[in-house]
């Protein structure tokens, strides 16, 4: 049988483009007949965050934590991420201008950008189309 940490990691990997709450993970595990409680889920999420496997974040206007898998091959610490406020989908902003942005922020504003914790929030193209209807 898989360890809880492995189950959680696999779930986050398979849903890396979406914002995931602890309750989503708990419900998935219960549906998979895992005999788990919420405390165990939170404890494993804390361990995975400490290991750098996932990121925990909150949106400014919400009082709930979300989790996302950190793909080390994607070098998530070198670029920004964008999240749609409507559908929750997460996008990697891995563009050539990232070095330019970092340089500008440091040179003009004395601000050293930490991309690993940076999340731009707005509306994705699909949701913009839906909202215009």
Image: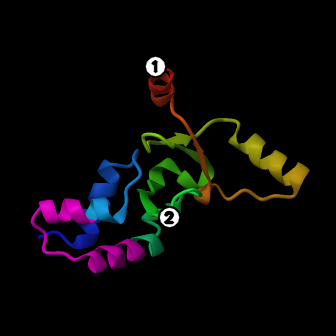
| Residue 133, numbered circle | 1
- Residue sitting nearer the eye, 91 or 39: 39
Where's the N terminus, which quadrant? bottom left
> How far apart in space, not on screen, are marks 2 and 1 (Cα)?
30 Å
What residue range appears in magenta? 26-47
x and y, in percent, of residue 96 in the image: 66, 35
Q: Residue furthest right?
A: 108
Is label 1 in a helix, a strand or a loop? loop
Residue visible at 76% across and 49% down in the picture: 102
x and y, in percent, of residue 26 in the image: 25, 66
Residue receiving disc 2: 63
Label 1 near label 2: C-beta < 8 Å? no
Coloration of the structure image: rainbow
Decide if residue 47 is on the left or right side of residue 111. left
Does 44 lie within the magenta span? yes
- Picture quadrant where residue 28 is located: bottom left
| Residue 96, numbered circle | none
Residue 42, compared with residue 26, is above or below; it is below
Q: Give the main secondary structure, helix, strand or loop, of the magenta stretch.
A: helix
- Picture quadrant where residue 23 is located: bottom left
Q: Residues within 10 Å of mark 1 (few under 14, many from 20)?
A: few
x and y, in percent, of residue 39 in the image: 30, 80
Residue visible at 57% across and 56% down in the picture: 61
x and y, in percent, of residue 32 in the image: 12, 61
Does 56 lie within the magenta span? no
Residue visible at 58% across and 45% down in the picture: 121
Decide if residue 23 is on the left or right side of residue 77. left
Is label 2 in a helix, a strand or a loop? loop
Residue 30, compared with residue 81, is above or below; it is below
């Amino acid at each position: 049988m898989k360890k809880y940490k492995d189950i959680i990691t696999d779930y986050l990997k398979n849903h890396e483009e979406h914002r995931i709450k602890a309750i989503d993970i708990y419900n998935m595990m219960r549906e998979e007949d895992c005999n788990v409680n919420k405390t165990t889920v939170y404890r494993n999420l804390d361990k995975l965050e400490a290991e750098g496997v996932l990121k925990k974040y909150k949106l400014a206007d919400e009082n709930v934590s979300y989790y996302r898998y950190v793909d080390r091959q994607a070098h998530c610490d070198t670029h920004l991420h964008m999240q749609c406020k409507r559908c929750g989908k997460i996008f990697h902003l891995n563009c050539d201008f990232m070095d330019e942005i970092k340089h500008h922020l440091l040179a003009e504003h004395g601000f050293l950008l930490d991309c690993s914790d940076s999340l731009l929030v707005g509306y994705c193209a699909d949701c913009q189309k839906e909202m215009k209807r």
